[in-house]
Image (cartoon, rainbow, N blue to C red):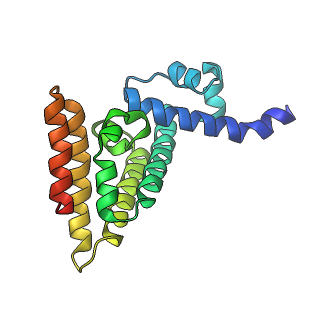
Amino acid sequence: MRKSREAAPESRGRIVKAAAREFREKGVVATGLADLMRAAGMTHGGFYKHFDSKDQLVAEAFADASEEMIGRMESQPTAGAAVAAYLSAPHRDNPASGCPLSAIGSELSRTDAKTRDAATAGFERLVDLLAARSPGKDARRRALVAASTMIGALTMSRVVSDPELSSEILDEVTKGLTGA
């Protein structure tokens, strides 16, 4: 029993990481508890030892995915580089490791308050990051526009069926936001 108590935080972390990937890849509604527990290398029965509900896990997985995304963006040397990395083909093509706002944002509007609070915090962090790297007194306004535009552009680049249009969306929005 003692070993399992010591392993519980590690197991919980594994579940959160797996859920963050699964939700971004397949969507919240389409991801069952059995699927995400299997992705974490665990059995379905262990879920309720770690979480009270799927909603609790969604909020924690979203927060984890947001931190991961913000960390990658913070590693970029400039706001323009962060925008370009966000609006890139590799980001578009790998939703499971990308921005949770663009991957599952439409689902989040129908989640519980705790999950929407996590989404709000993630969006605010993205806006703050962009504003901090933008000169001028209207940096926050421009960051709000940029963050919203980036999320929408990445989403649409995944939605359209024409690969050329998908690339054009990413390229043109990157140019529009960076002045390139």
Determine the residue positioned at 62% across, 40% down. Answer: 13
Residue 61 shows in this picture: yes
In the visual, does 17 lie left or right of 135?
Answer: right
Determine the residue positioned at 23% across, 80% down. Answer: 137
Dividing the picture into quarters, in which one does residue 50 lie? top right
In the visual, does 76 lie left or right of 169?
Answer: right
68 and 78: which one is in front? Answer: 78
56 and 73: which one is in front? Answer: 73
Q: Position of residue 132 (x, y in %)?
A: 35, 71
In the visual, does 171 lie left or right of 87?
Answer: left
Dividing the picture into quarters, in which one does residue 176 lie? bottom left
- In the displayed structure, would residue 79 be above or below residue 62? below
> Which residue in the rendered view is the most extreme toward the bottom?
137
- In the displayed structure, would residue 84 be above or below residue 12? below
Q: Position of residue 166 (x, y in %)?
A: 18, 35
Q: Position of residue 165 (x, y in %)?
A: 13, 35
- In the displayed structure, would residue 165 be above or below residue 170? above
Q: Quadrant of the N terminus?
A: top right
Residue 109 shows in this picture: no
Q: Quadrant of the C terminus?
A: bottom left
Determine the residue positioned at 40% across, 56% down. Answer: 73
Determine the residue positioned at 48% across, 49% down. Answer: 68
> Which residue in the rendered view is the most extreme toward the front?
180
Q: Position of residue 172 (x, y in %)?
A: 14, 49
